[in-house]
Image (cartoon, helix red, strand yellow):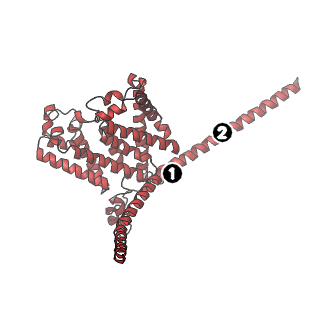
Amino acid sequence: MSGFRRTLGSYGLTLLRFTRGLARDGLAGAWDGLARGGRYVEDWLLGEKHAKYGLAVARMLLALTGIGLLVANFRTRLYTFGSGSAWNGEALHPASDFPQIGIFSLFHRLALHDIAFTLGYLGLLGLAVLVLVGWRMKIILPVFFVMWVSFIEMNDSVGDQGDNMYRIVLMYLLFADTAARWSFDASRRTRARTAQSRVGRIWQGDALLPSWLTNLFHNLVLVVVTCHVCFVYASGALYKAGGVPWQQGYAIYNPLQTQRFGAWPELSDLVGTWAPMVAAISWVSIILQMAFPMMLLRRFTRVIALFGIGGFHVGIAVLMGLPWFSLAMIAIDAIFVRDVTWCRLADRLRSGWRAARYTDRTRPLIDDATADVAEREVARA
């Protein structure tokens, strides 16, 4: 009996030691994993700026969205936003709270003065062009953001959710380096390295703050924009999935038959002719939006998600007549495309442009030579 007790005690002591060693190794492994994860996050946030080309494309497409909206509404600017819209009562009692905030009240103060409003309208258009080319973005982008919010809140009845996403992302981009690539600022920074004084380098676009701090803000903007876009798509998919039209697959048919969203009646009728296609588009849009955050984790699925969501927005632009909403969302999604992909696309475009220019230059020479040969053949005959 005593031998059995000693054996049992020995096994118990061995099991206790094994459990203690396993726990110690597990804790050490967990701590090591946490340390590696912390170092990776630190390096990713502070080491360098990511998605510089993607943010540059987002900046340019958002600027094009603003330019397109302003140009498209220029002839009706007074009726839509200015003195001609005073009948809706927003000139005296604005539906939005922004006109009551001093910094965002510029266009509200100019609304009843046609000439001043037109000058402000053209000034906003000029700022959008400067954002497009990336000129002095540290100064221009904040001014454009303030003026854009002041303008877009003039008439609450003509806005849509694209306006909300537009200004929210503009606010995020204030803290990112959107002019690091494909901008006048990027060209100026290359010249800043040759400047002699610190003031001269800063004026040419050199960094004013330490690189680790600017990298932190830049990369955090990517994180915040990614989270915001994923929330928008996922919440939209959940909202749609709870509706009977989406469950039964005829949700996209209804708006295309209305006067407001049926921009191309013939095309709308063509899309709505085959019921299985209407149901497939309705259900695929829900699945794509719901799975979008998870599909970003792998390159193969990310490519499918970006092409799918891009086609989704192109369909909204063409079929429902909402081009500026779609272009704004496509601009935001541009940050998910890798920088190497944008560089390859730019190289192909440059190569195609150079080849076209070379062909245009050599064609007259070839034509002249062919004509000379033909003339000599005629003379011999």
Quarter of the image with the N terminus is: top right
Instruction: Identify the element where label 1 is drawn.
Output: helix
Residue 64, percent from left and from top: 30, 49
Closer to the N terminus: mark 2 or mark 1? 2
Instruction: Identify the element where label 2 is drawn.
Output: helix
- Is 141 situated left or right of 353 in this image? left
Residue 326, percent from left and from top: 34, 40
The residue lying at 42 percent from left, 39 percent from top is: 309
Residue 12: quarter of image: top right
Residue 320, percent from left and from top: 31, 35
- The label number, if any, that marks residue 212 in the structure image: none
The residue lying at 58 percent from left, 47 percent from top is: 36
Q: Depth-wise, is mark 2 or mark 1 nearer the camera? A: 1
Q: Considering only vertical position in the picture, is 378 above or below 223?
A: below
Amino acid type of disc 1? Asp
Q: CA distance from mark 2 to mark 1?
A: 25 Å
Q: Which residue is mark 2?
A: 26
Residue 169: quarter of image: top left
Labels 2 and 1 touching (C-beta < 8 A):
no
- Residue farthest bottom in this picture: 380
Residue 319, percent from left and from top: 33, 36
Q: Is residue 175 visible?
A: no
Quarter of the image with the C terminus is: bottom left
Q: Which residue is mark 1?
A: 43
Other residues around mark 2 within 10 Å, as few (<14) / some (14–19) / many (≥20)? few
Amino acid type of disc 2? Gly
